[in-house]
Image (tube, rainbow, N blue to C red):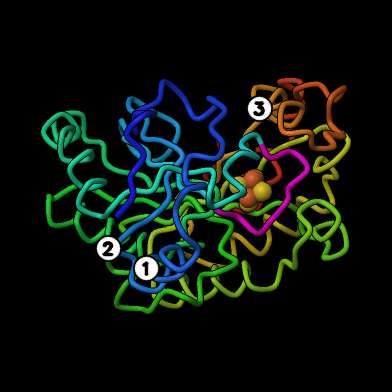
Amino acid sequence: MPESAAVPLAAKSPFELRVHLGDDVPEQTVREALASGDMGFVHSFTTGSTVDGPGVRVVAWTTGCMWRCRYCHNPDTWTLSNGIPVSVAQAAQELGKYRHGLKVMSGGFTLSGGDPLMQHRFAIKLLTAAKQMNIHTTIETNGYYGDRVSDGELATIDLVMLGLKTWDPERHKALTGSEIGPTLEFARRLAALRRPLWIRFVLVPGLTDDMQDLAKTAEFTAGLGNVERVEVLPFHQLGGYKWERLGLDYTLRDVPAPTAALAAEACEVFRKAGLAAF
Ligand code: SF4
């Protein structure tokens, strides 16, 4: 199985631009990998995150995402073949290096991306390996492919962090290039199964700061009954340079980060609906 030796799995941050690291993997091998989950494509592993789940996290950033969010800060993760091809065993070995530290720091392992459910078989195998090491597991996902994962497989995920982007379906399509329906369906299913859920919302001035739209997102979120926490994430420009380097049309070049007052206002909308929002 081809594996990239030149670029290390570990990165200082997901804002490192990584491209073409899996280009040499034959198409047939990619198809087999996706079908079996024995091999996956990973942008990088990062350590010491305090913003990707409870406690201190090791995060694996998978490649592959079908959405095209206008504010995405990791567009190099859209393309599967930009990632490093790794076997489940190799990825589990990388994670295993940190297992004792994660326990001491009440942290865990987060599978992010990209969208990790693009490689759902690999994701479940890696999360299962993490559980076997007694490590708390989280995924960060847009939820679009939630129906690929069975109820039994969901049991390998201690916490789902689901991104809700905007409420209005047309606005959602314009913002992400995708339909909102499957994401909401996944959220409802997690609620029915009473699986722990955090909601993440990226606040972008002029794009996702319509408070009436936000109130509808909050109403839906509160109605689920299994949402432990809502995180309002202020838009930033850290990934902007990736768009330029990849030759993509970055439309948010001149958009500022939200003010503290705007972020507080957004949090308040969720709190008014009875949610714990930060
Ligand atoms: S779902 Fe996430 S990874 Fe995919 S385009 Fe949107 S922000 Fe980027």
State the residue in front, 263 or 98.
98
Q: Which residue is mark 1?
A: 121
Q: Which residue is mark 3?
A: 239
State the residue in front, 104 or 15.
15
In the structure shown, which secondary structural element does the residue marked by tag 2 occupy? helix
Q: Residue at x 72, y 37 (%)?
A: 203
Residue 185 sits in quarter: bottom right
Q: Please state, as top left, top right, bottom left or bottom right, where the C terminus lies in the image.
A: top right
Q: Is residue 234 left or right of residue 251?
A: left
Three-letter residue code for mark 3: Gly
Q: Please state, as top left, top right, bottom left or bottom right, where the N terminus lies in the image.
A: bottom left
In the structure shown, which secondary structural element does the residue marked by tag 1 occupy? helix
Q: Which residue is mark 2?
A: 125
**Residue 264 visible, this orientation:** no
Three-letter residue code for mark 2: Lys
Q: CA distance from mark 2 to mark 1?
A: 6 Å
Magenta-span inclusion, residue 67: yes
Res. 242 mark: none
Residue 208 sits in quarter: top right
Q: Residues within 10 Å of mark 1 (few under 14, many from 20)?
A: many
Magenta extent: 64-72
Q: Which comes sooner in the sequence, label 3 or label 1?
A: 1
Counting from the top left corner in percent of width and height, residue 105 is at 20, 29
Q: Is residue 105 left or right of residue 267?
A: left
The answer to whether residue 192 is above or below residue 128 is below
Q: Residue at x 82, y 53 (%)?
A: 213
Residue 256 sits in quarter: top right
**Residue 23 visible, this orientation:** yes
Q: Which comes sooner in the sequence, label 3 or label 2?
A: 2
**Proximity of marks 3 and 2: CB atoms separated by less than 8 Å:** no
In the structure shown, which secondary structural element does the residue marked by tag 3 occupy? loop
**Proximity of marks 2 and 1: CB atoms separated by less than 8 Å:** yes
